[in-house]
Amino acid sequence: MTNPESVAKEPASQVVGLESLEVVRPQALTMEISRRLLEYLLAGNVEPGEKLPSERRLSEIFGVGRSVVREAIKPLALLGLVEVRQGDGTYLKSMESDLLPQVIGWGLLLGTKRTLDLVEARRHIEVIVAGLAAERRDEEDLEALSVALQGMHEAEKADDYVAADIAFHLAVATAAKNETLYEVMSSVRSLLQVWIAKVGVSVGLSVSAAEHDSIFEAIKNGDTEAAAQTMDAHMEWAVEHLVKTLEDERG
């Protein structure tokens, strides 16, 4: 385990878990470093609550400027994996549960194939959950869905929209009355956060919000088939826009 206090004194090649990382290519440099840092953290080289090597040390290890390292850390912070404390450093966040269930949320950093696998899995889960929600929802569930839907339509900032969108999908999972499926949906919250943000920004928040109206109506009407179909159509639409956004980002 790397001792944060000793990192600054160690030559770059001696930082445990990072010494085997190859020099990254200029192409897609930030994303590449994000993936390498993710691999380093998942290997257990840093425990929750521990400090990562400093930006200066990481820049020496990777042979890049500190600004590149800083940008590479941002996706990890967005996904809730690390906490950046201004003037102090970057820490692996403490988790109430084991880190491994969160891997699905970090998959967006693991390459196109892994990302598309996760997206495909989420699509099928959402369709199943929506059908069950239409069959089993109660008035409390409908109220939660309505509030979340209203929040999406009224959101002016991306962060507010993402929060409302995640609340909507988790409310659908709650309405399904299946604890296992709810736990699966909860475990992909980080993936949802990144996915929703990318799609929402690319197509516009109001357009993305409108995609959920028919899902809500089908669940409200107790129409199992329509709920599954409308969710599947929404997922197909979202996947299409997410893939396009990812392709645009990677050039």
Image (cartoon, rainbow, N blue to C red):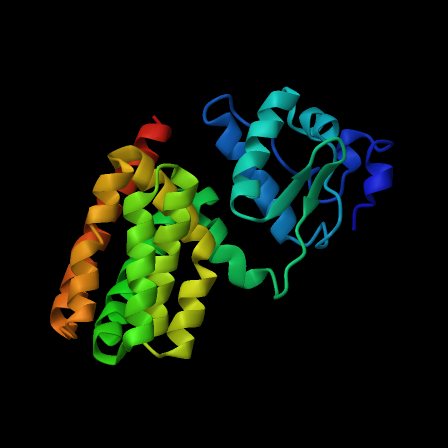
Corner quadrant of residue 137: bottom left
- Residue 42 x/y as whole percent: 61, 52
**Viewer-side residue, 60 vs 53:** 53
Check the image and report above or below for 169 versus 59: below
- At 38% across and 73% down in the image, what residue appears? 181
In the picture provided, is 219 more to the left or to the right than 10?
left
In the picture provided, is 119 more to the left or to the right than 47?
left
**Viewer-side residue, 41 vs 227:** 227
Check the image and report above or below for 232 versus 211: below
- At 15% across and 58% down in the image, what residue appears? 214
- Residue 72 x/y as whole percent: 56, 32
Check the image and report above or below for 65 versus 121: above
Number of numbered labels in the structure image: 0
- Residue 8 x/y as whole percent: 83, 31
- At 28% across and 61% down in the image, what residue appears? 146
Corner quadrant of residue 22: top right
In the picture provided, is 144 more to the left or to the right than 135?
right
Kindly tell me whether residue 122 is visible in this rendering. Answer: no
In the picture provided, is 40 more to the left or to the right than 223?
right
- Residue 165 x/y as whole percent: 35, 52
Corner quadrant of residue 184: bottom left
Quadrant into which the C terminus falls: top left
Kindly tell me whether residue 125 is visible in this rendering. Answer: yes
**Viewer-side residue, 210 vs 23:** 210
